[in-house]
Amino acid sequence: MKRKIYNDLLDWKNNNIDMPLMVIGARQIGKTYIINEFCKNEFNDYIYLNLFEDKGIVSIYKENISSEEKFHKLEIYINRKINLENTIIFFDEVQESEELISSLKYYSESDKPYKIICAGSLLGVKVNRFTGSFPVGKIRMLEMYSMSFDEFLFAYYGNDLMIKEIKKCYENNVSMSEVLHNELINLYNIYLIIGGMPASVSNFISTKDILLYDKNILSLIIDSYLNDMNKYLYDSYEKSKIENIYKSIPSQLGNQSNKFQYSKVEKNARSKDYYNALNWLISSKMVLKCEKVNKIEKPLKAFIELDYFKLYLSDTGLLANLLEIDINDLIFDNDFMYKGVIAENYVGNELLRNNKSLYYWDSGNKAEIDFLISTIDGIIPIEVKASTNNQAKSLKVFMEKYKSKYGIRISLKNFGFENNIKSVPLYATFCIK
């Protein structure tokens, strides 16, 4: 399946290939698949090495010898002389070897033309908890996520004609034809159910019939996420805390307080008791953190309130699965309490995939803005609605208070621009850059 990160891999090849590349993201989002495709398509020679499956490589890099000697031993171990000019090496599951990660500094600084890509499960956690000498500034890091809605559309249609039409309507603030608008809303509702995990998308695309979709795929992915804790954590109490936070997120998203509450994880729980567990989940990319700001100025990061934040799941399909959402409720557009929550989780993921950090704002009891983005037009407020609701009270309060150039309302309503509010259908969120 076509993935947008392929263009980032090409950019690395053309501009920074002398610096090793590390691709970070949650499990089962397609890292290995797309890197394999890239290496096969773009290089004359390609070597794939999986450190989880081959502990011999891990042992070599543990030896107390120079990085150059380790590479020479690697050649002997895999029984081939590597032509550095023409060969790219993909170290998968690289989190298994801190020593190899440390050696990336040598490969970056060497006069020899090493071409190296790394990826792995829970690599974000490994980077965040690195105990050795991490090669800061010596590697290029790329964030990867599950499939965005436009990637899903490309898989569904087999081309980008519909994507181009959506972008045209977005840029010109002109309505999509009613028949296409309704078709895209239907596909958006389907996407909320299946999410963007490649295995899940592939299962649906094989029949294009949501009634034949195997929702057990997402259950198995969630199980594999939780099983990862058994592989990489040795403290059973820490494991239980991480799992409890993860499983609490659906109920957290329904909070009227609009903030993460530790009491929903465990009675009388305190932030200091769950700091490491929360940090593990965020580093693993299994959850996304949206931080509250108390001042509307650039840079927003400078004005976050540390104790106020929201968590979203890294994939909308996983959220729908944990909530045990009835497929019919989404397909037939039935009203239910969590409809808005799922839409908000979806928008947060789409913004993050477009390299937008997640921030929100509220004024107490009067108004709340779901997301804020920093643009050349200033700080732009975004309000998310799960229906065609035209009301944008919070948006208007914010825009009047902070003199925003314009605001964005994301809903099921068609494209348009009125009263300084840009109307963006939920299926077009990927257009917001």
Image (tube, rainbow, N blue to C red):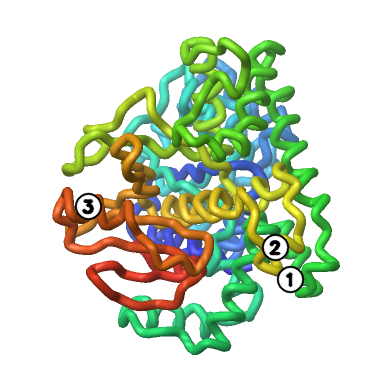
Can see residue 43?
no
Tell me the quarter of the image containing the N terminus.
bottom right
Circles 1 and 2: CB distance less than 8 Å? Answer: yes
- Mark 1 lies on a secondary structure that is helix
Inter-mark Cα distance, 2 to 3:
34 Å
Residue depicted at x 38% and y 63%: 391
The percent coordinates of residue 77 (x first, y second) are: 68, 35
Inter-mark Cα distance, 3 to 1:
38 Å
Left or right for 198, reference 279: right
- The quarter holding residue 7 reads bottom left
Mark 3 or mark 1, earlier in chain: 1
- Mark number, residue 419: none
Amino acid at pointer 3: Ile
| In the rendered image, the vertical position of residue 153 relative to residue 97, given as above or below | below
Q: Which residue is mark 3?
A: 379
Residue depicted at x 71% and y 42%: 322
Amino acid at pointer 2: Val
Single out the mark in the foreground, 2 or 3: 3
